[in-house]
Amino acid sequence: MTLTLPAFPPFSLSAVVTSHGWARLSPFAMSEDGRQLSRVERLHSGQVVELVIQEADHGVKVEVSDQLSDREMAEVADKVTWMLGLDQDLSAFYAAARQESKLAQVEARAQGRIIRSPMLFEDVVKTILTTNTSWTGTIRMVEALVSQFGDPLSFDRSRRAFPTPSQLAALDVQRLRLAGRLGYRAPYVLELALAVVSGDLDLETLKTSDEPTDQLRSRLLQINGVGVYSAANLLAMLGRYEYIPVDSWARKLVSHEWHSGEPVRSVEVESAFERWGKWKGLAYWFWDWSYLAQD
């Protein structure tokens, strides 16, 4: 089955896919040029399908591996729209970016959208798995979770969907720690899954919440395993850009951009982009860094 979905212009699938490393984490898979994105997805009905996404005129074309009902196809449309930010209007950001040479190319390249998972639960788990490890470690842990606990495609059981909160909540810490190879992160992931299953934490409502960003950030910080860096990344995935994910890399970039390589603190990183207001995190994300140009 084929589905065509419109995108708010300007749009580039490859720009979204390559916006950060999520497209390289299972159950996503991407082509080398970023022009095709595939994903194994479990629908609310329990059906597990493969979605193959390519750019089309004014949007994307989605090839679905199985015959689905109208309700299931509507679910696929909603998930892909969220995943790729097809309905995001970034015209105000582009208007501001036109006044800054370091962001001069973002509109022409249709940059600004940040790839995300269909469910915020998956994004929070993956974000927890980025902490205190290398990127290869994150890839390994995510792949272990998916391959051990996710539901398989009917025609290729080697490929699986991301496990649901219920599937992870049914595990104990020891099994999650060993089979998922999560180490100290296992209790955080299990606690999160249990909170979602019990209804104590409704992550999906955060996607459409109209509460101020500071309050949304406070709610994210209440999740064990989510610190200020992780919360800033998750806010960006929620379309809230008032915070910068400050780490040693961000400090290095700002140090070389404005401080001649001298050490800087987190406050200098934040203040460097303060004038961007609600677009602060997005300006940081797509800034044309002098330090990177030297490499």
Image (tube, rainbow, N blue to C red):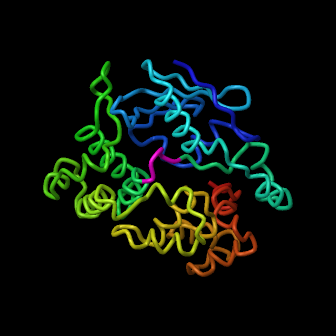
Write down the quadrant of residue 58 in the picture: top right
Range of residues picked out in magenta: 116-120
Write down the quadrant of residue 155 in the picture: top left
Q: Which residue is more in the foreground, 93 or 15? A: 93
Q: How many marks?
A: 0
Residue plotted at (73% across, 26% down): 57
- Does the magenta-highlighted stretch encompass residue 14? no
In the rendered view, tell whether residue 71 sits above or below residue 99: above
Give residue 87's position: percent from left, percent from top: 67, 44
Give residue 159's position: percent from left, percent from top: 32, 29
Query: Taken as a whole, is the magenta stretch helix, strand or loop?
Result: loop
Give residue 118's position: percent from left, percent from top: 48, 44
Residue plotted at (56% across, 81% down): 265
Residue plotted at (52% across, 69% down): 216
Q: Is residue 165 left or right of residue 283?
A: left
Q: Which residue is more in the foreground, 287 or 71? A: 71
Write down the quadrant of residue 13 in the picture: top right
Residue plotted at (49% across, 41% down): 23
Q: Quadrant for the C terminus, please.
A: bottom right
Q: Is residue 136 left or right of residue 37?
A: left
In the rendered view, tell whether residue 136 sits above or below residue 263: above
Give residue 252's position: percent from left, percent from top: 57, 69
In the rendered view, tell whether residue 200 sits above or below residue 60: below
Q: Which residue is more in the foreground, 227 or 41? A: 41
Q: Is residue 205 left or right of residue 186?
A: right
